[in-house]
Image (cartoon, helix red, strand yellow):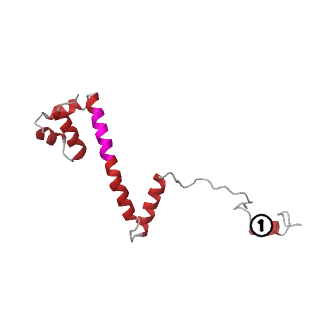
Amino acid sequence: MLNEKQQKCIILLVTTNKTQVQIAKEIQINKNTICEWKKDEEFKDELQKQMKNNFSSLAIDAQRELKKLLKSKNEYVRLQVVKDILDRAGYKATDKIEHSGNIESPHLSLLESINRQLGGDGDGKK
């Protein structure tokens, strides 16, 4: 079980921009102690858990901000927000387009294309 200083250390690591040196000073431990704690499985697990919880709470704020940006006067910003939201919702642009009709080769000459449309075989003869 983590002691009080370890728990306080985890909270400060997750919720502040303080360095390990600053945190060590605040909770009155040696700066190397935090490095040692970070090697401990129980400490690492709790740190990961608290980081995950912290990010989950930030997700609500992030969603609110995205909603605000959808109303931006800048068209580029709105487009990027829409793309991001759709991407995160699983709606990704397709890489392949299904087509059931004939597609003319881009290398056909105009004459060959006209001949085919008129019923010729492409060599200038009918």
For label 1, the residue is 113
Give the residue type that dot 1 points to: Ser
Q: Is residue 78 magenta?
A: no
Q: Nearer the viewer, residue 51 or 37?
A: 51
Residue 77 shown left or right of residue 50 in the figure: right
Q: Quadrant of residue 80?
A: bottom left
126 sits left or right of 86 in the view: right
**Relative vertical location of residue 18 with respect to residue 117 in this rendering, above or below:** above
Residue 52 belongs to the span the image colors magenta: yes
Graded by Cα atoms within 10 Å as few (under 14), some (14 to 19) or many (20 or more), the crowding at tag 1 reads some
Query: Which residues are drawn in magenta?
Result: 44-55
Q: Identify the residue at the far right of this view.
A: 126
Is 13 left or right of 104, judged from the image as shown? left
Quadrant of residue 97 within the rendered picture: bottom right
Q: Residue at x 22, y 38 (%)?
A: 10
13 in relation to 66, above or below: above
Q: Quadrant of the C terminus?
A: bottom right
Element under disc 1: helix
Which residue is rendered at x = 10% and y = 36% of the image?
A: 28
State the image coordinates of residue 34 (x, y, percent, origin top left). Answer: 19, 34
Q: Position of residue 113 (x, y in %)?
A: 77, 67
Dividing the picture into quadrants, the one containing residue 93 is bottom right
Give residue 104's position: percent from left, percent from top: 73, 61
Q: Is residue 32 above or below residue 121?
A: above
